[in-house]
Amino acid sequence: MTNSTLEVESKDRDGNSTWKPVANLGNTVSSSVSSNQQEPLTADNADKTKEKYPHRKNLPMRVKHFLSPNATIKVHRKANYLYRHSSDKIDTNLLILLHGAGDSHQAYHAFAKKMNLPQCATLSLHASSINKGFVTLPFDLGYTWFEEMDYTTGEDLKKGDDRIFSSLDKAIHHLDTLIDLLSGIEKADDDDSDYWIPERIFLFGFSAGASLAMETCLYRFIHGKQALGGALCVCGGLQHGRNEQEICHDDGAICATPVKIMVGGDDTKFSVEDSRVSIANYNHYAFCENAQRMTNAGQLTGATSFVKPFKGHSMIQDEEETRVLMGFFAEYMVRRMTAMEGFCEIPSEQFQTSK
């Protein structure tokens, strides 16, 4: 990747928010990240750390077991996922990162650290997680989220192939289950673990990971599940050829997750036309007659795109793309105003002086 200026939010002495360049993305997605891996909290110091940083959130134990069920030591878990607290110690939002076919989650863990989104913890997943619950590529080429190729011939599967959708539906189920675990769905009354409500959970995916992210957002809307905060999809989107799906709810309070697709003008694997079809199919449901009738039109959200001219099938590369990425997350991520917490309203009569 070429150099790219990254801006993050900071505050001056008066508490005003400003955005300024602080880092260079460079070759983040292909760089080594051994020095970037953050050690999880131990049981001995968890209480002290929680008291010192009350807005930091640790992954619930149920999530750890789901992602890495056979782990006996920390190294096993790191092979399946990498979790990082926000650098400002306030984990208001959570960004889940999904790599492309055969890629490593470590590179995306480093990419997330370079982005340094305010008040945002990150969870970088590897497709070997959930006890190899996704797809193992042949010839030791790694893992991916769903089948896109006929491994006996080496040819790409045609659009609409049942093998794509059967494996994709399995992947969607796994990711949706993870989101439910992260948001505390059906948690026990005595469970005091840390959770994120769905609207504060975001997805970022590249290629196959982008497709899984957008498909999961559509799945949640069709099945009447609460929208996520947003999904940014690089060089990937909905799979074409799926039959019309029936919306399984009539709840007007359910809106679709906002999605931004970033596509290269010269991408032959996921073309500009592919992105247009993905957006049209997604918005067909997001802006359906039922949603428009039962929801304030101003609250409807759907999918949009950004086209980078002369770019192929590759990750974020320059400053313009970085600004699009940062702008999308800045629009939808929530900021917790910790400076105002602990204050209470004082009744006006308490300010009256006695005569």
Image (cartoon, rainbow, N blue to C red):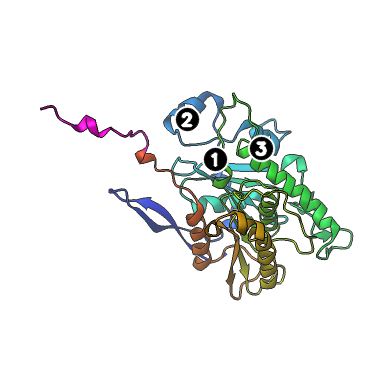
Residue behind mark 1 = 38
Q: Nearer the viewer, mark 2 or mark 3?
A: 2
Query: Which residue was labeled with disc 3?
Result: 77
Residue at the spot 69% in from the left edge and 46% down from the top edge: 175
For the residues labelled 1 and 2, say whether their Cβ atoms are less than 8 Å apart: no
Asked if one can make out residue 292 in the rendered structure from this viewpoint, the answer is: yes
The dominant secondary structure in magenta is: loop
Amino acid under disc 2: Lys
Callout 1: helix, strand or loop? loop
Hey, what amino acid is under mark 3? Arg
Position of the N terminus by quadrant: bottom right
Extreme residue in the left direction: 355
Q: Which residues are magenta?
A: 341-355
Residue 269, placed above or below residue 196: below
The residue beneath circle 2 is 50
Q: Earlier in the sequence, mark 1 or mark 2?
A: 1
| Residue pictured at 61% horizontal, 59% vertical | 292
Q: Hey, what amino acid is under mark 1? A: Gln
Label 1, label 3: how far apart the Cα atoms are: 12 Å
> What secondary structure is found at the residue carrying circle 2?
helix
The one of 280 and 160 positioned closer to us in this rendering: 280
The residues bearing labels 1 and 2 have C-alpha atoms spaced at a distance of 16 Å
